[in-house]
Image (cartoon, rainbow, N blue to C red):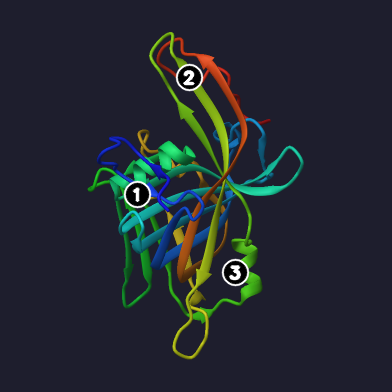
Amino acid sequence: MVNLKSAPLDAPLYQMDADRGIEYWSCKAVIAAFTVAGHVDDLVPRGLHVDSPALGAVLIADYGASTIGPYREYVSILRVADDDGVPGFYIPYIYVTNEAALAAGREVLGAPKKLAAIGVELRPEAVVGTLARPDECALTQVVVAPAERVGAELFDSLLPPGTPMYSLRYLPGPPGATQVNELIRWNCDLAVHSDAFGDPLRFTGPASVTYPARSGVDPVHRLDVGTFLGGVYVEFDMRLTAGSVVWSESVVAEGAGLPIAVGASS
């Protein structure tokens, strides 16, 4: 039953079943994992803490179909822990190619989505994921040659099932209006496809992640690569569901700028 939809109410940009969330099928993605060079504590909101060194990843995906339409997505990921030490993943940067996905991600979860040119191409040499914004400015390239299968144990160590995701839902307002800041915990469940032989379609091999251009407008390169840990290519179905509000606060907006009452973790 559809019970969550956007404005305009008589012609919503997106709508979904709040219990089932957004459902995806016929998906493929490249994922690169690494330790992050430099300090990124300021990217993480209050209540979450990064490792030392920070552990990061980049995911570039092609969602062949979903309940909000097909699109491609780029996600920067930081591994974090909450104040009780429970691990999770925080999303400092995320890009999509679909306006409904952008609006739903920002409005419901607080994911800081922008529109960009994103590609996932299966080439003879390797699978190549790319992010560009504007189109002629290549910001990230992830390359994975699918040379051998990845076992469930290794894959789950990269993306542990049930690990919560986090976004900062920041709703600004004009001076004197209520400005809302919320840390949202949400869930991402993957079901890896199998081939005709019954073997899961998840592969690893020679891989890399590079930032060809470094943009002040879209500083995804802040998750710079310290030690590269490996890359994966995977085909899957997925479900995204909103979990809960970790903390919420309202303040009176004083004007343009960042949330007054939100501080970085230390």
Q: Residue at x 54, y 80 (%)?
A: 149
The mark lying in front, picked from 2 and 1, is 2
| Residue 223 location (% of width, % of height) | 51, 45
Which residue has dot 3 on it?
155
Under circle 1, the secondary element is strand
| Residue 161 location (% of width, % of height) | 62, 62
User: What's the amino acid at mark 3?
Assistant: Phe
Q: Give the spatial CA distance, label 2 vs label 1.
A: 26 Å
First in sequence, mark 2 or 1: give its number.
1
| Residue 128 location (% of width, % of height) | 36, 65
Which residue has dot 1 on it?
96
Q: Give the spatial CA distance, label 1 vs label 3.
A: 24 Å
**Mark 1 touches mark 3? (CB < 8 Å):** no
First in sequence, mark 3 or 2: give its number.
3
Q: Residue at x 34, y 49 (%)?
A: 96
Badge 1: few (under 14), some or many (20 or more) residues near its Cα, within 10 Å?
Answer: many
Which residue has dot 2 on it?
179
Left or right placement of residue 32 versus residue 106 in this view: right
Residue 247, picture quadrant: top right
